[in-house]
Amino acid sequence: MLQVYLVRHGETVWNAARRIQGQSDSALTEKGERQARQVGERMKSLGITHVISSDLGRTRRTAEIIADICGCSVTLDARLRELNMGVLEQRPIDTLSAEEEGWRRTLVNGTENGRIPEGESMTELAERMHQALNACLELPAGSRPLLVSHGMALGVLVSTLLGLPAHAERRLRLRNCSLSRVDHQQSAWLASGWVVETAGDISHLDLPALDELQR
Ligand SMILES: O=C(O)[C@@H](CO)OP(=O)(O)O
């Protein structure tokens, strides 16, 4: 059975300031770097063999810290990027106009193919996240990979593996450097394919971690 670990990047300057990143970027805070070291120690104890990361700066930095601790190298996969949030990227979330908030809501209320202008739909995000996860099935037997990605991206992946709509990601709390795990199993009696072992575990963190874009 293949076990794949999923980690959201450490806290960033814009997470703490409630600014929308999407495929734009900001640096990890000091706390974010600490979170990455703490999840790295946990990953080491779990025997991670591969660290595969979104190519955005905040995930790369988190992945490098983890990989250093685990003695692995980092492979980049652009399919693990956060949702492209189009014209709302870089904006403080508390300054959105009613029209802009309406665009954001088309994403989170499940409007089919809803998207922020110049952005991506949840369906497109789900497709590329599933491709990145399924690529782990090609790794050599005995591999234990870790994917380092983002709040909405991982939330959409876990929600859709459970058979829920992509926007059910709103119901998952994936804090910075939280750990989730999905397993690929064959079972005639239980489900065959991907099953969710755990989601959003932060027991390795010693300080309270932010929820997505929350204070
Ligand atoms: O892009 C962002 O601002 C948030 C949105 O959920 O995601 P993350 O911090 O996980 O990249």
Image: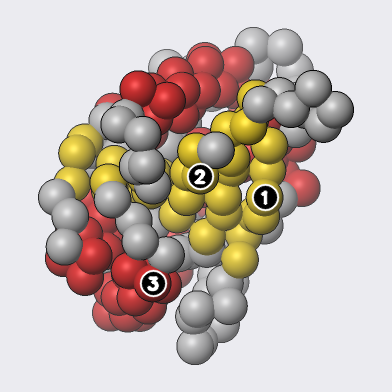
Query: Helix, strand, or loop for circle 1?
Result: strand
Tell me which numbered mark, 1 or 3, is placed earlier along the sequence: 3
Residue at 35% from the left image edge and 42% from the top image edge:
143
Residue 165 falls left or right of residue 101: right
Task: Classify 137 as above or below 73.
Answer: above
Front-most of 68 and 164? 68
Kindly report the distance in space between the C-alpha atoms of the residues bearing marks 3 and 2. Answer: 14 Å
Confirm or deny contact between disc 2 and disc 1 (CB under 8 A): yes
Q: Is mark 3 within 8 Å of ligand 1?
A: no
The residue that disc 2 covers is 3
Instruction: State the separation of the CA atoms marked 2 and 1.
Output: 9 Å
Q: Amino acid at mark 2?
A: Gln
- Which three-letter amino acid code belongs to the residue tagged 3? Ser
Instruction: Give the residue pinned by disc 1.
Output: 197
Q: Residue at x 59, y 42 (%)?
A: 182
Establish if 143 lies above or below 46.
above
Q: Which residue is mark 3?
A: 45
